Structure formats: C-alpha cells, structure tokens
Amino acid sequence: MINVEHLTKYYGDLCAVDDVSFEINKGEILGLLGPNGAGKTTIYRILTGYLTPTSGTIKVKDYNIIDHFLEIKGLIGYLPENAPIYHDMLVFDYLNFVADIRGVAKDKKLTHIKELADLCNLNEVMHKTVEELSKGYRQRVGIAHALMGDPEILVLDEPTSGLDPNQIAETRDIIKRIGKQKTIVFSTHILSEAEATCDRMVIINQGKIVANDKLSDLKKSLKEDSFENIFRTLTREN
C-alpha cells in the first residue's frame, strides 16, 4: 500500500530523516514511534505532499510522491498534531465547509457528515462552535475532517497529545473502529499508546529506524521483561 524507500531529508546541514525504508500494508494500523525531533513529522509531511525529500521517495499504490503528489493527496486524510480548524465556526458548518472543499457530492454530503459525526462521537456538539469544545472534541473534529471524502489512508500525527486519560481512551476507540476499514499510520512517543492501538511498530530515533516489527515479535526479540526499558533507551530524548 505504502512504500517508503531510502527516504532522506535535510534542513540545511541537519539530517532530519536518514535513509529510512519501510512498508505499510493495506488495512494495517502502524505506529510510528519516537521522541520529539526523531523525524516522524517530517516523514508525514513528505508523505502528504507538504515537503519534498532530499533523496529517496514514497510510493502509495502505483503513485510516486515526486510525480503524483496530487493523486496521493486524494488518497490520504491527514491530521497534523495541531489541527488547523476554524474556531469561530459551528462544528456542523465546519464539516460542511470541508465537505465542499473535498468535493463531496451535494446529494451525499449530509449523509456523509452524519456518518462521520456518528463515528467520531460528535452528535452532541454539532451545534457548538469549535472554540467552545474541549481539546478532545477538537481532535475528534480534526479526525472527522481527515476522514472527509472517504480517503483510503488516514495519517495522524500525535492524535492524543495533550488529552486527558478519558479522551485518550475515546480517541483510541475511534482509531480502532476506523482501522477496520482503512489503512492508518499514526505517530506517538508513548509506548502504551502504540501497544493499545497498532498492529505493528516502526521505532525511529535521530532520523533512523531502530526497530520495525509486530509488537509481540519485538517483545520476544528484545526480551519481554525489559522491553519498556529498551524502548526508552532506543527513543531517549537527546
């Protein structure tokens, strides 16, 4: 579904992503783990067409990100860490606005918005402005935005950052439900977050991949009793 091939990105002399390669299978929930500054967001911005790589490439289905970034954008719904939502709009009006931008057909728009409101548990706040909402609800609006137009792939950058435990649990549940129908890749620096949600982990540190496997296999290869300590060492803040 997605192939990241020898991806490298420099910002001046700083190498943010260093010769990274991995695959994401169709229907998989993949967790991209690592500390802040590891290179996760840079990979997402290249995948979603906001940045060009210094070298290497990303292929989505039969499309290359260099030559076909518009086609790839049409396949992906993207939620950045800080969701770019208009706070003065009612939730319904905002989703209606996004539906128009994403080209949702007029005769299907209301049904699609209702489906997303149900999926993201937004029905009770559709009449409120975004600025009235808790951060948890704002994140759900952002997820609904990313899902507008029914993209095949959902990319979530730190979707539970700054949420309280109840909001985190609710967001995890939404991601799991979406994962039954779509390919999802999300980033986090919290091990328990990935354990509770993803099928496979790619651990990245200082722009390099340090582990790539299913959680159960990682625990076996790294010795289960010390897995968390090893994870902290691999992804330690510098």
Image (cartoon, helix red, strand yellow):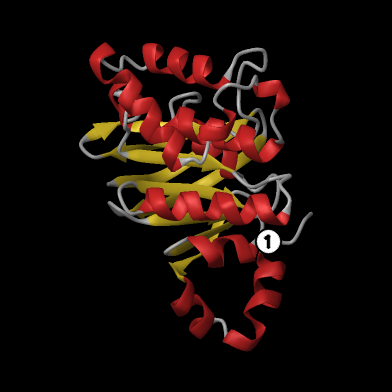
Quadrant of the rendered image containing residue 222: bottom right
Secondary structure found at label 1: loop
Q: Quadrant of the C terminus?
A: bottom right
**Residue sitting farthest toward the right:** 238
Q: Is residue 186 above or below residue 155?
A: below
Q: Quadrant of residue 135?
A: top right
Q: Which residue is drawn at 71% across and 76% down?
A: 229
> Going 61% across and 28% down the picture, which residue do you hit?
83
Q: Residue at x 60, y 21 (%)?
A: 85
Q: Where is residue 194 in the image (x, y as percent from the top left)?
A: 55, 61
Residue 190 in the image, given as x and y percentages of width and height? 66, 59
Q: Mark 1 points at which residue?
A: 235
> For the residue marked with disc 1, what is the amino acid?
Thr
Circle count: 1
Dot 1, how many residues are within 10 Å of its Cα: few (below 14), some (14-19), or many (20+)?
Answer: many
> In the depicted view, which residue is nearer to us: 71 or 165?
165
Residue 51 is at least partly visible in this image: yes
Residue 151: which quarter of the image?
A: top left
Viewer-nearest residue: 27 or 212:
27
Vertical order, 188 against 199 (above or below) = above
Q: Position of residue 231 (x, y in %)?
A: 65, 70
Decide which of 91, 233 is in the foreground and name it: 91
Q: Is residue 53 visible?
A: no
Does residue 184 appear to the left or right of 10 in the view shown?
A: left
Q: Is residue 212 above or below residue 111?
A: below
Q: Where is residue 128 in the image (x, y as percent from the top left)?
A: 63, 22
Residue 90 in the image: above or below residue 165: above
Question: In the image as oriented, which residue stretches furthest toward the left?
Answer: 62
Q: Residue at 43% across / 25% down in the picture? A: 49
**Is 118 left or right of 225, judged from the image as shown?**
left
Question: 99 left or right of 124?
Answer: left
